[in-house]
Image (spheres, helix red, strand yellow):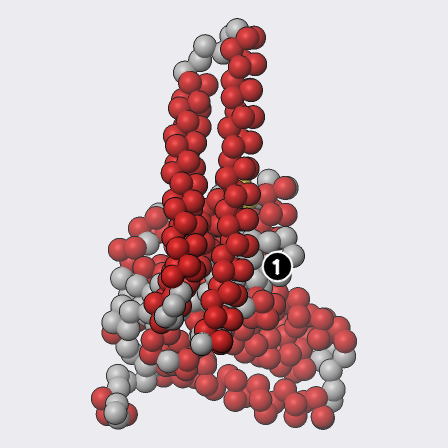
């Protein structure tokens, strides 16, 4: 058992921020509520600040700077840098470097700074309270960020910026509103603490609670409820396998306000080159996971010869689809090259190429569809296995 003596020393600044501030909020916010009360406008301001901070972390720190899931206009980057500083989760440079390490070494207790393997508490905020080796800054994975003047400006002036956003702005609002203490407590303190914990859920709960439809190779989970609390980041299983996708909730109905924000920005020229993983690759990941699960289940059951044969037949079809897709990709690449190579002057050639590209698209769609159907068949097969296991 690890004793306190063996643990690295506490980090006093972080303890003050992550233990002191929540305790202060716990006592002061209700006390002022009883003594003086808050009005609706103060609650609304707190909510607005919560979303401005939260989306700057998820849309800026996370999807833009850590994963390069799209490119942003400098105006949008400044917006993220300022409101992100207001979230008090360290500078973009440090946050993103840590996060890239988290992805690269996910669940590795020696290298992932907030490895879920070290427990729920550690991955939530325990990792920040002590001087763990895994917190040592190493920017060798963030050279691109060190070349970004906005990132470096924010890193240099981080303390001033975070004080301005957390104390300065709420103070100004309070003066304008008339209740300085109440506004500081609600828009400053409570909003900060709530935003801390909902973002920390992504490292903690989203690695423990939920489903794993895309991969079982790491602990990340998909959880719609957590997505609601975390500005869309709760589809964490998807995110860990396709980290460069600007979306985390890939279906239109999945709650992902960060995705909607980036999309809206792209429509008004503030964002471009949004990365979307092709549907086929997503389907392939789902099926891969399903096959693995089905095989594991069959391994434990006896008298399942016919099911085993069906599964292998399905796997054969799956491999054929993947091969067909790879061939089509190569064809598309060749077609693109020919297009760039010129020879487009003749109308006839142009029409031929158009026909080719439509034919190619149709084939892609057919393949996508065949994987979707296979996904359904595998679901039925798994159901059959469950029934057989129950009967046995
Ligand atoms: Zn994660
Ligand atoms: Zn990430």
Q: Residue sitting at 65 percent across and 92 percent down? A: 31
State whether label 1 is within 8 Å of ligand 2.
Answer: no
The residue nearer to you, when weighing 88 against 351, is 351
Seen in the picture, residue 287 relative to 7 is either above or below; the reply is above
Question: Picture quarter containing residue 124?
Answer: bottom left
Residue 142 percent coordinates (x, y): 32, 54
Quadrant of the frame with the N terminus: bottom left
Q: Residue sitting at 56 percent across and 31 percent down? A: 362
Residue 246 percent coordinates (x, y): 51, 50
Observer able to see residue 92? no
Outermost left residue:
6
Look at mark 1 in the image and give the residue it sits on.
254
Outermost top residue:
346
Disc 1 secondary structure class: loop
Determine crowd level at label 1: few under 14, some 14-19, many 20+ residues with C-alpha closer than 10 A: some
The residue nearer to you, when weighing 16 against 203, is 203
Left or right: residue 92 versus residue 187 is: left
Seen in the picture, residue 301 relative to 24 is either above or below; the reply is above
The residue nearer to you, when weighing 286 against 113, is 286
Quadrant of the frame with the C terminus: bottom left
Observer able to see residue 120? yes
Residue 198 percent coordinates (x, y): 54, 73
The residue nearer to you, when weighing 321 against 359, is 321
Q: Residue sitting at 42 percent across and 62 percent down? A: 294
Seen in the picture, residue 259 relative to 54 is either above or below; the reply is above
Left or right: residue 374 versus residue 117 is: right
Residue 91 percent coordinates (x, y): 42, 63
Q: Residue sitting at 29 percent across and 78 percent down? A: 131
Question: Picture quarter containing residue 55?
Answer: bottom right
Outermost right residue:
40
């Amino acid at each position: 058992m690890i004793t306190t003596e063996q643990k690295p020393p506490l980090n006093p600044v972080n303890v003050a921020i992550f233990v002191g501030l929540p305790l202060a909020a716990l006592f002061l916010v209700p006390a002022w509520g009883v003594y003086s009360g808050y009005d609706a406008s103060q609650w609304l301001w707190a909510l607005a600040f919560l979303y401005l901070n939260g989306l700057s972390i998820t849309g800026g720190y996370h999807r833009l700077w850590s994963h390069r899931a799209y490119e942003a206009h400098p105006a949008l980057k400044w917006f993220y840098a300022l409101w992100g500083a207001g979230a008090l989760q360290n500078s973009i440079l440090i946050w993103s470097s840590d996060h890239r390490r988290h992805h690269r070494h996910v669940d590795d207790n020696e290298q992932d700074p907030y490895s879920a393997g070290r427990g729920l508490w550690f991955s939530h905020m325990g990792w920040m309270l002590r001087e763990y080796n895994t917190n040592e800054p190493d920017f060798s994975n963030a050279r691109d960020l060190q070349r970004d003047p906005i990132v470096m400006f924010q890193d240099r002036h981080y303390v001033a910026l975070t004080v301005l956003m957390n104390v300065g702005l709420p103070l100004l609002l309070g003066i304008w509103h008339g209740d300085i203490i109440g506004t500081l407590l609600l828009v400053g303190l409570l909003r900060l603490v709530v935003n801390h914990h909902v973002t920390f859920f992504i490292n903690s709960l989203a690695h423990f609670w939920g489903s794993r439809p895309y991969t079982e190779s790491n602990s990340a989970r998909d959880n719609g409820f957590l997505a609601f609390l975390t500005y869309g980041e709760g589809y964490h299983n998807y995110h860990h396998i396709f980290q460069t996708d600007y979306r985390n909730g890939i279906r239109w109905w999945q709650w992902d306000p960060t995705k909607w924000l980036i999309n809206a920005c792209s429509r008004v020229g503030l964002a471009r080159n949004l990365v979307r993983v092709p549907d086929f690759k997503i389907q392939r990941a789902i099926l891969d996971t399903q096959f693995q699960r089905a095989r594991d289940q069959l391994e434990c059951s006896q008298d399942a010869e016919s099911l085993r044969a069906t599964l292998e037949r399905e796997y054969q079809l799956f491999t054929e689809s993947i091969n067909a897709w790879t061939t089509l990709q190569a064809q598309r690449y060749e077609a693109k090259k020919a297009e760039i190579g010129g020879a487009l002057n003749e109308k006839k050639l142009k029409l031929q190429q158009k026909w080719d590209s439509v034919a190619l698209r149709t084939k892609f769609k057919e393949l996508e569809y065949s994987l979707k159907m296979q996904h359904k068949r595998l679901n039925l097969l798994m159901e059959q296995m469950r029934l057989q296991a129950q009967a046995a």
